[in-house]
Each structure stands twice: as C-alpha cells, then as structure tokens.
C-alpha cells in the first residue's frame, strides 16, 4: 500500500542559529556497506546514513549473503558486517528492491556483473524512470547480461559472469557512479580494469577501495585524460569506517544560513573531499561568509566544521567543469542565486536531466512559479537575482526528488509568501530528520493540514 503524500510548507520567520550535525555521507555509506560485504573479516561502520536509500543497500547486502547488523552504542549506531570475500556473493532468493537509491542500484549492478549469479533489481516509481543503459552497456563488456525495460530502465534482470574479462573503458560523460560501478565489477576480474574520465570525478570509491586493501594506480590516456587502473581479485580486509557528514545534505542549512537575515550557524563534521567542494567554492565566489575550522582526516576523508553568517550574495558565472564536484547541489545553488544580486549562470548541467527527476527543468519551473526570473539555454540554467526576497506563494511539484524538496523549503524561508512542496516523503532517502533539524535552528516548516 502506497503511503500518503506529505505536503510541507516553509514560511519566513526569525534568524537561524545553532550548531548541528547532518546525516552521514550517502555516497560513502553505500560504498562502506558494499565493500564490507566483499571483505574478509569484520567491518565496523559508524556515522552511517540511516536514510531509506542506504537501508536498501544494507538489505541487498544481506540478501547477497553478507552478515549486516546494527547496534546502539554510547557514541551512536554502529553497523557491523562480516563479508563474503571478493567473488563470494550468493544468488539472492528475492528481487532486490532499491527504492529510490540510484547510486545504490548502479553500484550494485557493478558488483553483480562479475559474480556467476542471477538477480533482479527494481525500485520505486522515480527510480524506474531513470536510465541505466550508461551503466549496463559498459558492464556488459565484462561478459554480464542485462535485460530491462525500454531505455535500459528498471526492473532489470542481471545474469552475472563467472569468467569476466578485464575492461578498459573511457567514460563518454563524467560520472562517479558509472566509474565506481566499473571498478566494483573489476574487483572480481582477473587482470587490470581501467577507467578513463573526461574530467576527474569524486573519488570516494578509490579512497575506500584503498582503505580495504585494493591496489589502484593513477593512469592517463594517450591524450592526457586521467584514469584509474584497478588490479583485479584482491583480498579485501575488513576495516573500520567513520562516515563524515554529507556535504550535499549540509548544503541546505548552510545556504539557509546565508540567506535568512541575521543568521549564523555551524554544521559540524562535514566531509570536504576535494571532489565534493564545488558548492563551497561557488558560494565563496558569490561572497558568502563561510569559515572552515577544526579540519581533520577521518576514515581517509578530509573533514571540517563549517560556519556561515548571513550576508549579501552576488551573481556569478559557474563554469561547466565544476559540475562533477557539485552535481547534487545545483537545486540549492539555484535557490542561493535567487536570493543574490545579479545574474548567475550555471553551465553544463545536462546530467541534471537524468537524476531522481529532471532537476534542470524542475528547478527552473519551481523558481519561475515563485516569481524568480529564470531561463534555460541548452544545458545552462540562468537565474536573475534581484537582491531581494522572491515572491514565493507557490506549491512546487517535486516529483519525489529529495533534493528538490529541501531546496524549495529553503526558498520558502526567505520568500515574501510561503512556499509549499507537494510531497516531502522522499526527503528521508538522504536526510532523515531534516524538518526537525531545521526547525531546531529556528526555521518555520510544517505539514500542510
């Protein structure tokens, strides 16, 4: 039975203030569970994002034969895995339902592709609309077979291979998900698997693979394009993983703190992987008062506490080559641009068309409904900020997209009239407790009766 929709509304109120921690990084959480399921021995994961997306990955790892347990400790939840070893996953008895987890589904296809087993993957209505061919096509080069709906969409049946061939593949479009799926497939492949990127993408997989004992080398193609070479069939060894706060989740309270008058707030323990800091660099160029303190390394990832103070922002030109470092943050960046003075042009956003929703078109439609001057030219999103609060007064159809939902709730905190979203259920996929956390800072967000 489908749960009823959850309509939420955000209104302008007082200042935002406080010190908070956001949920664990979703990308790292998925990878920690998958590599823990392949490692020999015990893996302990603290700070895991306990959103619906990651819980689906945990359930899939159990279905594939790994031991996955959760315990409460004085420091918070601790997840413990006992893995099967590289090549040791067993055939699942049931369909693997990944819910809304696009990252989980694509990475899981990489794991399954080089195991001699049969599996079927499905997801919710939003995930079933998302194209998977850009993952299944290169994974097929290892020898795996995929059968899905038109356009390579879920549900997809996977027939993995027990005699995988090493692959050298050049990504036509920069994508950390596709790169990671290929590297995961390469784990159970004799020989060296090489992935070449048009531009570098986030390297969570490479860092965590190294943390668990895999051997990777940086390489380059004949034209100098960067790449990663993975030596196949390593023995991964269980390891402790501390998951930092997700920078994509931290983006929402940080931008809210910059936009809401008289606000000052701190988000503790945010991951600052160099391939994830595009939004922070962009906000700094817009004039944001943003400070990083207590910088440290946890689980192989750089981490810091981030403090923002309200102040004026100005429009800028955001280059296309920054997109891989902030692809999930464009909806909330567009909200920041709506509150800025001047025009912000965000270039090269074609990837947004194939996220949980068409985020490029959806962001433009939502901003326009709230009285913001906005246009799309090719793959560029252009927002004309007036330096004053947008009109608001609209209900935004977010198409079960968690980042769209949170972005427009932040917009409602500064708009002249309240901004509502038609359904906030998907927020829990990446940011459980978002509304309570924001209201704890002073935001006015509530359910629509």
Image (spheres, grey):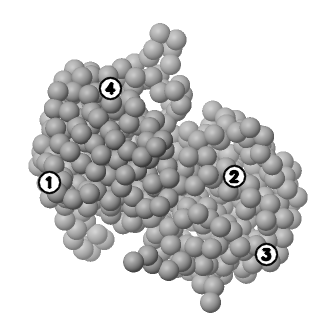
Q: Earlier in the sequence, mark 3 or mark 1?
A: 1
Q: Earlier in the sequence, mark 2 or mark 4?
A: 4
Q: CA distance from mark 3 to mark 4?
A: 51 Å
Residue corresponding to mark 1: 65
Residue corresponding to mark 3: 393
* Residue 220 against residue 70 in the figure, above or below: above
Return the residue found at the far front.
150
- At horizontal 24% and vertical 74% (from top left) the residue drawn is 72
The quarter in which the N terminus is drawn is bottom left
Q: Secondary structure at mark 1?
A: loop
Question: Observer-nearest residue: 303 or 239?
Answer: 239
Q: CA distance from mark 3 to mark 2?
A: 19 Å
Q: Earlier in the sequence, mark 3 or mark 4?
A: 4
User: Do the numbered discs 3 and 1 sit on residues whose CB atoms are within 8 Å?
Assistant: no
- At horizontal 34% and vertical 32% (from top left) the residue drawn is 139
Q: Residues within 10 Å of mark 3 (few under 14, many from 20)?
A: some
* Residue 229 against residue 130 in the figure, above or below: above
Q: Residues within 10 Å of mark 2 (few under 14, many from 20)?
A: some
Q: CA distance from mark 3 to mark 1?
A: 50 Å
Question: Observer-nearest residue: 251 or 449?
Answer: 449
Q: Position of residue 377 (x, y in %)?
A: 78, 40
- The tag on residue 141 is 4
Q: Earlier in the sequence, mark 1 or mark 2?
A: 1
Choose mark 4 or mark 1, whichever is in front: 4
Q: Earlier in the sequence, mark 3 or mark 2?
A: 2
Choose mark 3 or mark 4, whichever is in front: 4
- At horizontal 62% and vertical 90% (from top left) the residue drawn is 449
Residue corresponding to mark 2: 361
Choose mark 3 or mark 2, whichever is in front: 2
């Amino acid at each position: 039975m489908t749960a009823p929709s959850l309509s939420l509304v955000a209104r302008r109120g007082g200042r935002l203030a406080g010190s908070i921690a956001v949920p664990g990084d979703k990308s790292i959480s998925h990878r920690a569970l998958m590599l823990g399921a392949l490692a020999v021995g015990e893996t302990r994961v603290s700070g895991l994002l306990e959103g619906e997306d990651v819980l689906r990955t945990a359930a899939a790892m159990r279905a594939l034969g790994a031991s996955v347990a959760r315990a409460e400790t004085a420091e918070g939840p601790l997840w413990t895995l006992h893995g099967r070893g590289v090549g040791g996953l067993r055939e699942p008895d049931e369909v693997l339902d990944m819910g809304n987890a696009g990252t989980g589904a694509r990475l899981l296809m990489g794991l399954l592709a080089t195991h001699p087993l049969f599996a079927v993957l499905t997801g919710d209505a939003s995930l079933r609309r998302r194209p998977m061919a850009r993952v299944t096509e290169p994974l097929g080069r290892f020898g795996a077979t995929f059968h899905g709906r038109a356009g390579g969409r879920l549900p997809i049946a996977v027939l993995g291979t027990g005699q995988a061939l090493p692959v050298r593949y050049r990504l036509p479009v920069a994508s950390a998900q596709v790169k990671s799926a290929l590297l995961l497939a390469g784990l159970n492949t004799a020989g060296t698997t090489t992935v070449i990127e048009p531009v570098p993408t986030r390297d969570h997989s490479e860092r965590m693979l190294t943390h668990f004992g895999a051997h990777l080398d940086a390489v380059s193609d004949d034209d100098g394009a960067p790449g990663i070479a993975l030596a196949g069939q390593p023995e991964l060894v269980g390891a402790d993983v501390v998951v930092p706060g997700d920078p994509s989740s931290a983006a929402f309270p940080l931008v809210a703190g910059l936009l809401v008058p008289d606000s000052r707030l701190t988000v503790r323990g945010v991951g600052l992987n160099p391939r994830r800091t595009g939004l922070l660099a962009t906000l700094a160029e817009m004039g944001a008062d943003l400070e990083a303190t207590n910088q440290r390394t946890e689980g192989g990832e750089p981490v810091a506490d981030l403090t923002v103070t309200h102040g004026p922002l100005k429009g800028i030109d955001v280059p296309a080559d920054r997109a891989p470092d902030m692809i999930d943050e464009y909806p909330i960046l567009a909200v920041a641009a709506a509150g800025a003075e001047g025009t912000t042009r965000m270039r090269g956003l074609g990837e947004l068309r194939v996220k949980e929703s068409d985020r490029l078109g959806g962001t433009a439609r939502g901003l326009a409904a709230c009285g913001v001057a906005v246009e799309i030219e090719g793959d560029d999103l252009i927002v004309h900020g007036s330096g004053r609060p947008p009109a608001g007064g609209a209900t935004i159809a977010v198409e079960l997209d968690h980042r769209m939902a949170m972005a427009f709730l932040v917009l409602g905190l500064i708009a002249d009239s309240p901004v509502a979203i038609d359904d906030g259920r998907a927020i829990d996929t990446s940011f459980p407790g978002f509304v309570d956390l924001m209201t704890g800072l002073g935001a006015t967000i509530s359910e629509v009766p």
